Image (cartoon, grey):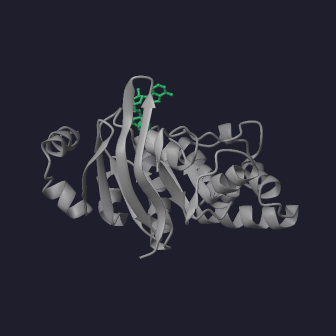
Amino acid sequence: MEPLIVVDHVNKHFGELHVLKDITTTIHRGEVVVVIGPSGSGKSTLCRAINRLETIDNGTITIDGQALPSEGAALAKLRADVGMVFQSFNLFSHKTVLENITLGQLKVRKRSKSDADKRAMELLDRVGVADQAAKMPSQLSGGQQQRVAIARALAMDPKVMLFDEPTSALDPEMINEVLDVMVGLAKDGMTMVVVTHEMGFARKAAKRVLFMADGEIVEEATPEKFFTNPQSPRAQDFLSKVLTH
Ligand SMILES: Nc1ncnc2c1ncn2[C@@H]1O[C@H](COP(=O)(O)OP(=O)(O)O)[C@@H](O)[C@H]1O
Ligand SMILES: [Mg+2]
């Protein structure tokens, strides 16, 4: 398989705190990788570093063979190639659902309004909220808003989608409607990095689980192997805690 994201010996500090410790991993095209680990282990920082929302101290991150530019138009283009979905949906609250999906297409991808509208409606249909297009985000449920956020990221035709705990802020009955959309994307061959503790999703869609603790990748395995037979004491300890919930 062809490498799409190559993270090579990456280190990152926040002051004295060493949050990414010599992280090395490769995400291949079409691969779905779940990142799991205790709070504070560096999962969000890794996602943000891949998208250049955070700088790194040293090491390299390349996306589709290109090193991450630090600023300017090249950075804007790279960001558009990397779709990002956060825990808190981060929709533009003063714009309609439809406008949320067309804005980046018009500004970054320079599409015509009619092309952008057409693509937006296709994507809203795909995530099951086409009938909400004219509403404001605050009129939607959390699950609907997160599906709009996924559609917004997809509208840029990203090479990879990063999800940082996309269901953690949702009421339990809305989690599956978001996970179902993500499973569908995985089936369609999207390259995905997903920070989540949803084991059902990991088992259904992920090829590989990356377990992080204290800024390190402690263990990498298939979901089956990781959840049934974790090798490291830290993973065993973590799983014994999350599995009891
Ligand atoms: N902007 C920041 N400034 C200082 N410390 C931060 C910042 N962002 C994250 N951290 C710290 O870095 C560590 C890793 O955070 P994070 O990547 O958010 O972990 P996770 O997503 O696994 O919970 C934590 O100790 C956190 O408090
Ligand atoms: Mg986090």
Q: Quadrant of the N terminus?
A: bottom left
Quadrant of the rendered structure where residue 240 is? top left
Name above or below for residue 83 compared with residue 94.
below
Name above or below for residue 130 compared with residue 55.
below
The residue furthest front is 58
The residue furthest top is 16
Q: Quadrant of the C terminus?
A: top left
Q: Give how far across and how far down residue 84 sits, in percent.
A: 57, 50
Query: In terms of depth relative to the viewer, which is nearer, 20 or 174?
Result: 20
What is the tally of numbered marks visible in this picture?
0
Q: Give how far across and how far down residue 172 sits, in percent.
A: 40, 43
- Whether residue 152 is visible here, answered yes or no, is no
Query: In terms of depth relative to the viewer, which is nearer, 95 or 156?
Result: 156
Q: Quadrant of ligand 2?
A: top left
| Left or right of residue 9: residue 146 | right
What residue is rendered at 31% in x and 53% in y?
A: 210
Quadrant of the rendered structure where residue 43 is? top left
What residue is rendered at 71% in x and 36% in y?
A: 93
Query: In terms of depth relative to the viewer, which is nearer, 95 or 189?
Result: 189
Name above or below for residue 53 compared with residue 77.
above
- Whether residue 16 is visible here, answered yes or no, is yes
| Left or right of residue 159: residue 105 | right
| Left or right of residue 220: residue 189 | right
Q: Give how far across and how far down residue 70 sits, in percent.
A: 64, 45
What residue is rendered at 83% in x and 63% in y?
A: 111
Quadrant of the rendered structure where residue 140 is? top right
Q: Give how far across and how far down residue 64 sits, in percent.
A: 55, 66
